[in-house]
Image (spheres, rainbow, N blue to C red):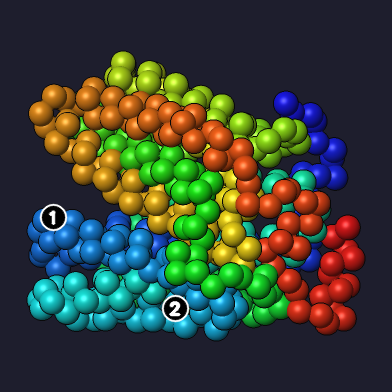
Amino acid sequence: MATEAPARGGYLDILRAPHAARLLAGTLVGRLPNGVGPIAITLFVRDQGGSYTLAGGLIAAYGVATALGQPLLGRAVDLKGQPRVQLPAAVLSALGMALLALTGTGHLALAYAAVVVAGLFTPPLEGGLRALWPSVLGREDRVHRAYAMDAVAQEVMFTVGPLLLTLLVSLWSPAAALLVINLLGVLGALAVVLSEPSRAWRSAPREAHWLGALRSPGLLALLGSFFFVGLALGSITVAAVAYADDRGTPSVYGWLMAALGLGALVGGVAYGARQWSGAPERRLRVLVLLLAVCYLPLVLTPGPVAMSGLAALAGLFLAPVLACAFIVVDRHAPRGTVTEAFSWLVTTFGVGSALGSAVAGPAVELAGTVTGFAVAGVGGLIAFLVLLATGRVLGAPTAPETPAPEARHAVVAASPTAVHSEKNTH
């Protein structure tokens, strides 16, 4: 059930909160290297005279290393605080990409080592930002709206990032673009960790357990579902390339991806413009079902204009699904593991997306473009079925939802400025 949000509860109200705009912008800039990493690696390898096979291998190594590093670094953030982990990780990740840019692909072992370092130390800025929102915004409804704004901002980053990379490549070279993008990533991380909320944030005390956030059954259920959401999205990217090839117009691929992003933007803005009542777990089931249903018409593969419309429809519920999932993660993450929990969501989604690309490729080659888009629909439906099957587990969050989520997941170091900021958010 939804109700109209009051005017003071919009995105502008959130961005006016002390530190909010800086944290959001710094996080987005800090995530640029990872957001455009696969494209940047491909352009660099091709410029070096390497094959697409080599580019694919390096991208796979980078992706696997990122998937492994995110939850580990997220746990380190929960234990040690943000500045002591985020900034060193950002620097090491940038040095890995700098090593690739400066040494090239002549020595394969060195090239692979470089991308593994870059991926393994990718800072968990995404999870870190979501851990900061409660202490920055205070009221729970504002935190939830910030999650929606976060999902929308991601779509902007994934649209602007490749354009910036292409501009840098055209002005200089793929190697220079790698260096500049990663320097920007370090500066973004620096902007975050030097902020007062990041320096003051401390995770709530946690129970010592080797599984960390993964000891939560509800979180495991959510991750199982989001693996298939990622699979669906990954398969669309490959199927869209095949569709463009079938039409003999490579630029169609760009239009389809832009339409997918536009749909997500519209959906995210609409979702965040309302206040939602009821359990977010039930709402997430409905949203994932709608996401899956909107993927199914892609198998019709009409002409480019109509197909762009279907792509926009397919993206419509992506940002709302992500925003609602962030709330569910917050409700099910064990005490003191919030950054790690959000990082596991990022990892699972990324691994699912990579597998979706891997599955859609052979599917397209064996049975055509329609089959590639069918993988997306099937993935979305399985994601819904996982949520349906685990409804009882998801219905029992780790702790009851409270008006102040930070009381469960984080504390803010006592200081006059911190207290002042907290008063301003209530």
Q: Is residue 158 left or right of residue 413?
A: left
| Residue at numbered disc 2 | 89
Q: Is residue 48 left or right of residue 198?
A: left
The residue under the point 81% across, 80% down is 414
* Total number of numbered discs in the rendering: 2
65 shown above or below 357: below
The residue under the point 50% across, 48% down is 217
412 shown above or below 394: below
- Disc marking residue 52: 1
- Disc marking residue 209: none
335 shown above or below 293: below
Locate residue 88, reporting x and y percent: 47, 83
Q: Nearer the viewer, residue 177 or 399?
A: 399
Q: Mark 1 vs mark 2: give the one in front.
A: 2
Locate residue 172, reporting x and y percent: 31, 70
Amino acid type of the residue tagged 2 in the rendering: Ala
> Counting other residues with Cα less than 10 Å from the Cα at mark 2, is it few (<14), some (14-19), or many (20 or more)?
many
Which quarter of the rendering shows the N terminus? top right
> Counting other residues with Cα less than 10 Å from the Cα at mark 1, is it few (<14), some (14-19), or many (20 or more)?
few
Res 391 seen here: yes
Marks 1 and 2, the one that precedes in the sequence: 1
Res 159 seen here: no
348 shown above or below 135: above
Q: Is residue 269 left or right of residue 297?
A: right
Q: Secondary structure at mark 1?
A: helix
Amino acid type of the residue tagged 1 in the rendering: Tyr
Q: Secondary structure at mark 2?
A: helix
The residue under the point 49% across, 26% down is 289
Q: Circles 1 and 2: CB distance less than 8 Å?
A: no
Locate residue 380, reporting x and y percent: 40, 30
> What whole-number distance in Å separates the C-alpha atoms at marks 1 and 2?
29 Å
The residue under the point 18% across, 38% down is 361
